[in-house]
Image (cartoon, helix red, strand yellow):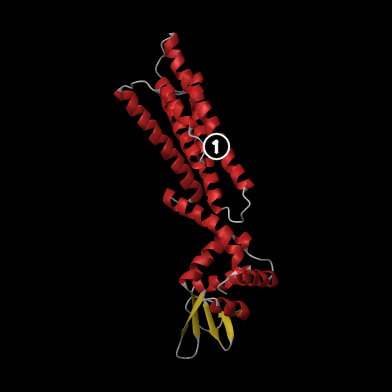
Amino acid sequence: MIHTEERPVTEDAQSRPRKGIRVARTAAALAEAAADEAMNAVCRSRTGNTTHLDQIMHAAHKEACQARKFADWTAEWESGDVADHVVIGYAGGAVDAAIRAQSAAGVEVTAAALRAELERPLTAVELAERENERRRAEAQEEAEQRAATGMDQDNRRHAENNRWFAQEYVPELGWTAGHVRVLEAAADRRLYWRGRQAWRAARPGQWSGGRKISRERTEALYAARFLTAERQTDGTRILAPTPMGAVALEYARLYPDGLHNSDRAAYEARYARVASDPDG
């Protein structure tokens, strides 16, 4: 049990935290409604490319979850686990998250009006405590995300953007899991070409022996400029990913569901992409 300051029994002392709880719950409801609207926009979209709408939906959903979390925390006041001024701080956090959710979803920012219900000149101690609570909440959230993903905030945002782009990009590559294995061998410095055959070396940099790897897929990746070759004096060609190949491999790893189940399906996807390109 967290020990908190004793509350005066006057009605005024009781009404302010209760108002904070009510405002926080209202803010959470507004944020969730904004997230639902963003999701509905994705469902209503008639275009094939919904990447931008998906990003909006996820941004609004993230803020709605944050608003609900703050609202749930305010309820702990009723069991005596949270001080009065902390409830107001949590309510302010819920309102801020609701404003961000509505802004992200592109709906009217009605949550801003809730701020007026919480306004009261705060003492220096209350301001400091509110800031500390905000920082503690952010630190806790960040620690949970790092533990779950092994990445900091910037890298998580970068990875999330890449995953959404990968969902559009990978199916159009016209690859199977076999194409990915070829590029992975190249990325590991284990792919080489000798005697009209592609080989996967037993160890990185060992350009003899190993086992055969698909010649057709290797040739296709090289022709499409996903691979580059460096010829050695004995005629061996060492294959490595081009910058474009390295990026494509990263996307394929992020979204393996976009890979095709057969070489025929992969070929048809590549053919459809070329056929739809007006520049040929």
Q: Is residue 80 visible?
A: no
Taking the view exactly as shown, the residue that stands out farthest to the left is 124
Outermost residue, front side: 278
Where 209 falls versus 5 (above or below)?
Answer: below
Q: Position of residue 215 (x, y in %)?
A: 61, 81
Identify the residue position indicated by label 1 in the image. Answer: 34
Q: Considering the numbered disc 1 on the image, is that residue within a helix, a strand or a loop?
A: helix
- Is residue 137 left or right of 193 when viewed as pictured? left
Q: Residue furthest bottom?
A: 234
Q: Is residue 182 left or right of residue 111?
A: right
Q: Quadrant of the C terminus?
A: bottom right
Residue sitting at x 59%, y 78%: 220
Against 223, is 21 above or below?
Answer: above
The image shows residue 259, relative to residue 238, as above or below, that is above
- Give neighbour class at mark 1: few <14, some 14-19, many 20+ (Cα, 10 Å): many
Q: Is residue 64 visible?
A: yes
Q: Nearer the viewer, residue 138 or 62?
A: 62
Q: Amino acid at mark 1?
A: Ala
* Quarter assignment of residue 4: top left
State the image coordinates of residue 46 (x, y, percent, origin top left).
63, 51
On the image, the x and y values in percent for residue 122 come to 33, 22
